[in-house]
Image (cartoon, helix red, strand yellow):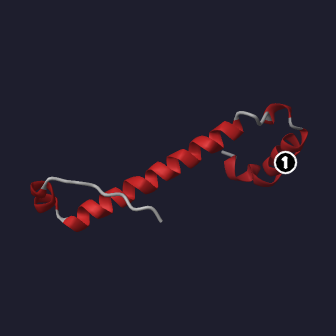
């Protein structure tokens, strides 16, 4: 594990509290990790051509056959 040292003004810590600051930082680091992972997935998706993929067409048609009743008016 890597440790980062963050310096904050004492007034900020007193105003917000140590625990809320720690939770805020952890929450945003997790979001940053998820965003980076999402960007990697999107890069991979650019290489996928579902319009011309026969297996995708078959799977889509089969799914529609079994699930179409949910979308009938």
Q: In the image, is 12 to the left or to the right of 70?
A: left
Label 1 element class: helix
Q: Is 73 on the left or on the right of 13, as rendered?
A: right
Give coordinates of residue 47: x percent, y percent: 75, 34
**Residue shown at 80% from the left, 54% from the top:** 66
Left or right of 47: which side holds 29? left
Residue 45: quadrant of the picture: top right
Q: Position of residue 1 (x, y in %)?
A: 48, 65
Query: Which residue is at a point 58% across and 41% down the rendered structure image?
Result: 39
Q: Residues within 10 Å of mark 1 (few under 14, many from 20)?
A: few
Tell me which residue sits at (81%, 45%) in the image.
Answer: 60
Residue 25: which quarter of the image? Answer: bottom left
How many labels were placed on the picture? 1
- Left or right, 3 with respect to 18, comes to right
Q: Estimate the x, y position of residue 5 in percent, counting from the top left.
A: 31, 58
Asked which quadrant contains residue 19, the reply is bottom left
Q: Is residue 72 above or below residue 30?
A: above
Q: Disc 1 marks which residue?
A: 59
Q: Nearer the viewer, residue 45 or 26?
A: 26
Q: At which x and y percent is residue 62?
A: 85, 50
Task: Indicate whether 35 appears above or below 29.
Answer: above
Name the residue located 66 percent from the left edge and 45 percent from the top edge: 73
Q: Nearer the viewer, residue 61 or 72?
A: 61
């Amino acid at each position: 594990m890597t440790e980062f040292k963050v310096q904050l003004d004492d007034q900020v810590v007193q105003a917000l509290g140590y625990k809320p600051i720690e939770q805020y930082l952890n929450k945003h680091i997790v979001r940053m990790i998820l965003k980076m992972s999402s960007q990697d997935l999107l890069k991979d998706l650019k290489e996928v051509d579902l319009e011309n993929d026969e297996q995708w067409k078959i799977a889509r048609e089969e799914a529609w056959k079994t699930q179409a009743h949910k979308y009938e008016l």
